[in-house]
Amino acid sequence: MLRHLPTRLALLLTLCASTALAEPRHGIAMYGDPALPPDFVSLPQANPDAPKGGSITLSMTGSFDTLNPFITNGTAAEGIAPYTFETLMARNHDEPFTLYGLLAESIETDDSRSFVEFTLREGARFSDGSPVTVEDVLWSYETLGTLGHPRYHTAWKKIEKAEATGPRSIRFTFNTEDRELPLILGLRPILKKADFEGKDFEATTLDRLTGSGPYVIDRVDPGVQITYRRNPDWWGKDLPVNRGQWNFDTIRYDYYSNPVAIFESVKTGAISAYREDNIARWANRYDFPAITSGEMVKLEVPHDRPSGIIGLVMNTRKPQFQDWRVREAMIELFNFDFINQTVTGGVSPRITSYFSNSPFAMRPGQPAEGAVLALLEPFKADLLPGTLEGYALPQPDGTAQNRAGLRRALRLLEEAGWTVGDDGILKNAEGTPFTFDILLTIGQDEVASVAAIYVESLRDVGIVAKVTMLDSAQMKARTDSFDFDMTYMIRTMSLSPGNEQNLYWSSAAAEAEGSRNWMGVKSPAIDAVIEAMLAARSQEEAASAAQALDRLLTAGRYVVPFWFADRNLIVHKANLKHPDHVQLYGDWGTSYLPALWWYEE
């Protein structure tokens, strides 16, 4: 018995230390402590005195056929989750990753973050007046973790036990080291269990679900329009985390067939606010009467977010894109300088890696060193050229023809077994022509213009590519099942990268229908550095893991990258007002516009 005493004493001390550190708190940060004290009045980016009232009309392209945003089937109407549903904790977008109590009044975890416990606020209510219960929370987590959209499934698999520990408290005990899990679980939407009794959770439906958020669905014209009405009896309207937010009486989304129709509606005033994503158009086409009269105004919103990756992704499940030399050739054939000048006036900065514009970015062309090198070295034998020694995107020669890039691309293709035949078509040793489709969504006019130029460059080396336009429902079905060769992809990155990286790039996600791993990458090295990212205890450790991941993805040559915006561009009616303080994330999702804005005559 005595020979086990040291081990038992060590375990007891560990448990005591964890217990001592575990106490309910008003918030939680990924690293360090929350910036705001327990008695904060409002978020720093919100105007606590903002008046309530007025309306705002926003726009979307395409259509929708379901009011359930938590499933893969169908296309959900915009805004349902952020406006009508709430989570246990709320994110402050003026900090990299910090949560404060929303449905939950407190959060508790230990130093190793082996569990998390939430205590519900006593007054938390659904919009029908019924209380948000522990049973609703447990049912929501299990249902979202096993059914519906796969983005929720990964976290659920890391939960060893989910249990009620009191009339208002819920504890989740983990089976995996993942320091982000308490925060991830704090951001799960809470659904009303009674809404789904006797119903198929995964079926598309136009039945309205019961949430606890600031708005309820007011009117629905399927596929055409959805209107949200501010709930005057919203239980959470006086919480500090909500004060000064969700000020409009109504928020409406109008759906249009294409961006041209949207812009015409902006000019007539039918749309209250519009986000422009092309800086050349921002400079040249915003001189219509509503602007010159002052009825509408232009706003530039800076941000400190990483660039993310935006461009044409190659599906490596397809044989023609499995060789890295082919993928490098595809990037070579994209004449970035010429295309950027043609489409944006040449002023938009190029995306040089997945975390450009942030401390998480690798240094293009520079060798890996220090902690980054240590993370990658165990996989050295299997890493693609440039990962360790340094990789930078190929540079075009500055001409419209980009002949130097064409020559480099042909050499790479030849090394990969593709040669140009007498008929001018690129073929492999079996005589199979190099052909593929670029799938785009109807309404992606700017991307279609880019793709048209790109197709001509591909033709110069004997590659036969064509652009196929699909409606949004068809595109979702094709990408969910990975039934495409190349398509347009956007993956946003935060200032605290974490579990979403598994959904984007992990081996498990590569075969999970509906996942975001469109490129189909399966890499033990990527899986390992994501795991290291999730286990990081400091911002420095997380940055090293992110830089290692950035090297693996960028040197993987999976995406033909475009450009990014280092600011957001918004044109809006002059009677829509916004706070002077711009949050760290800038215009991020709905957290800035419309959450922080208000109407003023």
Image (cartoon, grey):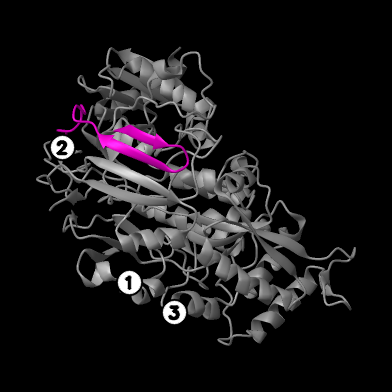
Q: Nearer the viewer, residue 407 or 83?
A: 83
Tell me whether circle 1 and circle 3 mark residues in contact (CB < 8 Å): no
Q: From what the image shows, is residue 396 above or below residue 488?
A: below
Closer to the camera: disc 1 or disc 3? 1
Q: Is residue 168 left or right of residue 408?
A: left
Query: Looking at the picture, which amino acid does disc 2 mark?
Result: Pro
Q: From what the image shows, is residue 261 above or below residue 347?
A: above
Q: From what the image shows, is residue 376 above or below residue 154?
A: below
For the magenta stretch, what is the residue range? 216-239
**Structural distance between the alpha carbons of marks 2 and 1:** 38 Å
**Structural distance between the alpha carbons of marks 1 and 3:** 15 Å
Residue at the image point whose x is 65% and y is 81% from the top: 405
Residue at the image point whose x is 58% and y is 87% from the top: 399
Ranked by sequence position, the earlier of labels 1 and 3 is: 1
Residue 139 x/y as whole percent: 43, 19
The secondary element bearing badge 3 is classed as loop
Residue at the image point whose x is 20% and y is 38% from the top: 242
User: Which label sits on residue 310?
Assistant: none
Query: Looking at the picture, which amino acid does disc 3 mark?
Result: Gly
Residue 383 x/y as whole percent: 64, 59
Ranked by sequence position, the earlier of labels 2 and 3 is: 2
Tell me whether circle 2 and circle 1 mark residues in contact (CB < 8 Å): no
Query: Looking at the picture, which amino acid does disc 1 mark?
Result: Tyr
Residue 372 x/y as whole percent: 48, 59
Q: Is residue 323 left or right of residue 546?
A: right
Identify residue for label 1. Answer: 286
Closer to the camera: disc 2 or disc 1? 1
Asked if one can make out residue 585 in the rendered structure from this viewpoint, the answer is no
Closer to the camera: disc 2 or disc 3? 3
- Crowdedness of circle 3 by 10 Å Cα count: few (<14), some, many (20+)? some
Identify residue for label 3. Answer: 345
User: Which label sits on residue 240?
Assistant: 2
